[in-house]
Amino acid sequence: MKHFTAKIFAQLFVRLRNGSETAVKLGVPPEKAKEASARLLSSERVKKEIRKLDKEDQQTLAYVKTGLSRLAFGQVNDVAALVFSEQPTPEQIAQADLFNVSEIKKIKGGGVEVKFFDRQKALEKLFELDPELREQSKADQFIQSLRESSQGDISHLLKDDDEEDCDV
């Protein structure tokens, strides 16, 4: 089994909010992930680190941002592997990251239709939830307004021809 610190496990867990998935991503074999994650999540060092990380991220609704981030930036490799597999085993299905999938449907002709959650909407929601991005956006809007207003009539700022040239 791979070795990692409580801090590394907690950091990834706070992002994923799934103990087994966190353990697998850190190198724990899938068949041992549930047991390992339960043991790690009951560790005082891991609990303390998770509380610390949650407290630092309290203003940004950590759970919502985590889910939206997974939707916006998640991979679809596991879904592709399942779709192209002739007979996926229950273990393969259980181990697959299907977080981004909104619907899977078998088509009469023998194909499979997979629908994913909208990444663009997830990014828009993340933008709405992030106060720093909103403040930056307000500043950008203010600067844009200033630029647009300065492009109006500026003839009163121009000097006569006999005076020295200047940049406006």
Image: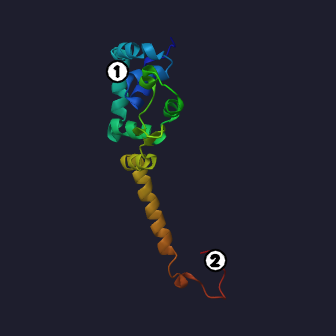
> Which of the two labelled residues, at mark 2 and mark 1, occupies the earlier sequence position?
1
- Give the quarter of the image for residue 46: top left
Where's residue 123, x and y in %?
44, 47
Q: Which residue is mark 2?
A: 166
SS of the residue at dot 2?
Answer: loop
Name the kind of residue labelled 1 in the image.
Lys
Q: Residue at x 46, y 21 (%)?
A: 89
Left or right of residue 80: residue 55: left
SS of the residue at dot 1?
Answer: helix
Q: Residue at x 42, y 21 (%)?
A: 90
Badge number at residue 66: none
Is residue 49 depicted above or below 100 in this figure?
above
Mark 2 near mark 1, Cβ–Cβ under 8 Å?
no
Where's residue 35, x and y in %?
38, 13
Pick the front one: 120 or 128: 120
- Give the quarter of the image for residue 159: bottom right
Is residue 97 depicted above or below 23 in this figure?
below
Q: Which residue is mark 1?
A: 48
Q: Please tell me how crowded label 2 is: few (under 14), some (14-19), or many (20+) other residues with Cα within 10 Å.
A: few
Pick the front one: 111 or 23: 111
Is residue 36 depicted above or below 92 in this figure?
above
Q: Residue at x 47, y 74 (%)?
A: 149
Is residue 115 depicted above or below 155 in this figure?
above
Residue 3 in view (yes/no): yes
Pick the front one: 65 or 85: 85
Q: Please tell me how crowded label 1 is: few (under 14), some (14-19), or many (20+) other residues with Cα within 10 Å.
A: some
Where's residue 162, x and y in %?
67, 88
